[in-house]
Amino acid sequence: MKRAVLKQLQDARAHKRPVALVTELETGEEALYDDGEVIAGELMLSAPLLHAVEDAIRQDRSGRLPEPDQGLLVEVFNPPLRLVVVGAVHIAQKLAPMARIAGYEVTIVDPRRAFATDSRFPDVDLNHDWPDDALQALAIDRRTAVVTLTHDPKLDDPALMQALDSDCFYIGALGSTRTHAKRLERLSEAGYADDQLDRIYGPLGLPLGGRSPAEIAVAALAQMTQVLHGAPPLEKRTPAAATA
């Protein structure tokens, strides 16, 4: 790896930006891809190749590109996935360890200190700031999922606004279809357009039929995985496990 490419790669990783190194196996020419463009290296990438590299980053999958570009090796350097959960409730107690097993760094945000305690969430980062302040400080990005669980607009809505203003890859909100409709109405009145509000998966989770906190957590994590990997979505507004 050439020094200029290595320096840019190290900088991207230090700042937790998802990047990919593309190498032409026969010639050794390289290209470092970062946020839609090549930022270092002498290898030229066509628009279809840029799309393929972006897909590799999204899939978190290194390897040779498919035909007709098998001579190109893509190495993906993604920062860890993150999950920010707003609301230190029973579902969060189940979702946090499941998400950690799936490779997420988990943060629980809840200013209610009686709920967000070390005894209820062992070995999980707890943030007691107001949700909008917390999410802003966490610098949520496209490797971040945000899930709101409190059912309290004073806590959930500020978090959802921060999430909508970011490029996080997933936004999920607990509540029934009726609750979600009211939520969308409030956010619309706050100035968010329909195409922005369509980013919110509500009711939360795939419609697996379960109702217990653990089953709702499974449904939420399954939907996060589906969205992360670009699998064909089910109808987002189909009622899932959660009820008002």
Image (cartoon, rainbow, N blue to C red):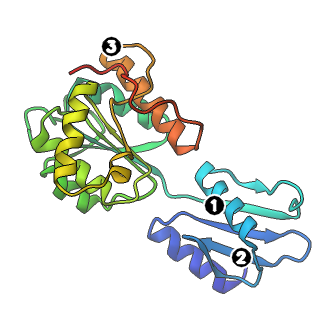
Three-letter amino acid code at the position of disc 2: Ala
Three-letter amino acid code at the position of disc 3: Arg
Q: Which mark is residue 235?
A: none
Number of residues whose C-alpha sits closer than 10 Å to that of mark 2, classed few (under 14), some (14–19) or many (20 or more): many
Number of residues whose C-alpha sits closer than 10 Å to that of mark 3, classed few (under 14), some (14–19) or many (20 or more): some
Find numbered disc 3 in the image and state the secondary structure of the residue it sits on: loop
Three-letter amino acid code at the position of disc 1: Glu
Q: Which mark is residue 211?
A: 3
Q: Is residue 59 above or below residue 36?
A: above
Q: Is residue 58 left or right of residue 116?
A: right
Location of residue 215 (image quadrant): top left
Given residues 14 and 230, the one toward you in this image is 230
Q: Is residue 207 above or below residue 49?
A: above
Q: Position of residue 53 (x, y in %)?
A: 68, 62
- Rounded to the nearest whole Å, what is the CA distance between mark 3 and mark 1? 37 Å
Q: Which mark is residue 31?
A: 2
Q: Is residue 95 above or below residue 84?
A: above
Number of residues whose C-alpha sits closer than 10 Å to that of mark 1, classed few (under 14), some (14–19) or many (20 or more): many
Location of residue 117 (image quadrant): top left
Given residues 145 and 207, the one toward you in this image is 207
Find numbered disc 2 in the image and state the secondary structure of the residue it sits on: strand
